Amino acid sequence: MADEERDGVRLTSLDQPLGDGLGVTKGDLVDHLDRFADRIVPQLAGRPLSVKRVRPGQEPFMQRNVAKGAPDWVRTVPVWSYGAHREVHQVLCDDRRTLLWLANQRAVEFHVPFFQAGAETAPTGIVLDLDPPEGADFDVVVAAAGLVREALDAAGLAGAVKTSGSKGVHVVVPVRGVGPEDAAAATRALAARAAALDPDVATTAYIREDRHGRVFLDSTRSGSSTIVAAYSPRIRPGLPVSAPVSWEDLAAVRPGDVTVTTASGRLGDGDPWTALLPDPQELPADLLAEGHTIPVARVQAMHEGKRRARAKRQAGEGAAGD
Ligand code: ATP
Ligand code: MN
C-alpha cells in the first residue's frame, strides 16, 4: 500500500481512487492540499470549518462535526447547529498537519464563514455568489460579474473574483467596522444595484422559475453561511479548484481550467488570491440604508410562494364554480 507520513500525519491508500468517477487518486488530493497549504490555511485559520468528503461507493457528504478519533492537537470550537438541534464541534484548521489530517479523511472541499470563531459579530467580508442558469455559457457569468464590479466601483468599493470551481464565480469584498446585519444588508443592496444595471443579464430572484435564463446574484451567503476557500478542490470530475482570477483575465477563464493536477503548474508558488484581495473596507452608509429596505431573499421567497399557492387555489376554486 502507498502509505507515508508527513508532518507526523499518517497518510494511507494514496494510490487508491479518491472517489467514484473523479479520475484522481487520494494522493492527488493530498499532494494538492499539501502544496497549497500555506495559501489555504490562512483562509481557514480560526474559522469554524465545514468539509465536503467523498469515498468510493458513497455519495459525497458535508461534515461540520469533527470526525471521531481526532488527534488531541486538532483544534475545535463548539457551535450550536440550528439545523441539527445540537452542539457540533467544528475544526479550526490552523496548520498544515490539520489540513493533512483532513486530507487523509478524503476531505476535498473546505468551506468557511466570513468571521473568526468567537467574533461572529465582526464579519471580515461579504460575498456575491453568482450562479449561472442551467446550461448557460460561462460568458453570461462573466457579464454578470462585470455588473457587480461596476456596482462596487460606483459605491467606492473593490472586490476580488474567483471561480467557484463548480459553475459560477464568487466576488469577495473584505470589510471592517461593520456588524452582521449591515454586512447582509450591503450585500443585498449591491446585488440589487448590479442587477438593475442590466436586468436582462442578472437577477436577484430567489425563486428559480423567476430567473428566466439570467444569472442569479445570491446575496444570502452571510452570517453563518459559508463559501468555499480559494484553491479548494471541488468534488467534480478531475477535481477542479476554486481559482482566483484578475478582473482583466475573467473573460478568458472557464470553470475547470484549474484542477488539482494543473494548479501548481499554472499558479506556481504564487498566491494570487492574497494579491488580488483589497484591504478591508468600510461600507458606505447609503448602501447599508438601501440594503435595510430590501427583504431577505429567502424570507421574501417563502411569502411569495405562499401567495402564489393561494392565488392558484383561488383560481382553481373560481374555475370550479364556473
Ligand atoms: P456553483 O458555482 O456551482 O454555484 P458554489 O460553491 O457557489 O458553486 P452554491 O450552491 O452557489 O455553490 O453555494 C455557495 C456556497 O454556499 C458554497 O460554496 C458553500 O460554502 C455553501 N453551501 C451551499 N450549499 C451548502 C450545503 N448544502 N451545506 C453547506 N454549505 C453549503
Ligand atoms: Mn454559487
Image (cartoon, rainbow, N blue to C red):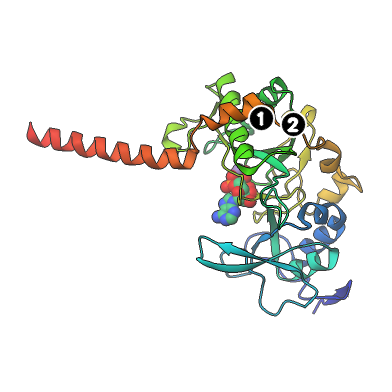
Picture coordinates of residue 291 (x, y %)?
57, 30
Q: Residues within 10 Å of mark 2 (few under 14, many from 20)?
A: many
- SS at badge 2: helix
- For residue 37, what is the image quadrant? bottom right
Q: Which residue is mark 2?
A: 250
Question: In the rendered image of this protein, does residue 35 appear above or below residue 12?
Answer: above
In the rendered view, does 208 fall on the left or right side of 103? left
* Ligand 1 within 8 Å of the CB at mark 2: no
CB under 8 Å between discs 1 and 2: yes
What type is the residue that disc 1 sits on? Ala
Could you tell me the amino acid type at mark 2? Leu
| Quadrant of the rendered image containing residue 32 | bottom right
User: What is the residue that sits farthest to the left in this orientation?
Assistant: 322
Horizontal and vertical percent position of residue 35: 87, 57
> On the rendered image, what quadrant is the C terminus found in?
top left
Q: Residue at x 85, y 44 (%)?
A: 266
Give coordinates of residue 263: x percent, y percent: 82, 49
Note whether 145 is above or below 305 in the view shown. Answer: above
SS assignment at label 1: helix
> Does label 1 or label 2 sit earlier along the sequence?
1
Ligand 2 sits in quadrant: top right
Residue nearest the observer in this picture, 264 or 204: 204
The answer to whether residue 143 of the structure is visible from this angle is no
Q: Is residue 20 left or right of residue 73?
A: left
- Front position in the image: 278 or 285: 285
Mark 1 is surrounded, within 10 Å at the Cα level, by few (under 14), some (14 to 19) or many (20 or more) other residues, namely: many
Q: Which residue is mark 1?
A: 145
Decide: is 25 above or below 286. below
| Drawn side of residue 20 relative to residue 96, left or right | left
State the image coordinates of residue 124 (x, y, percent, origin top left).
Answer: 73, 44
The residue positioned 13% from the left and 33% from the top of the image is 319
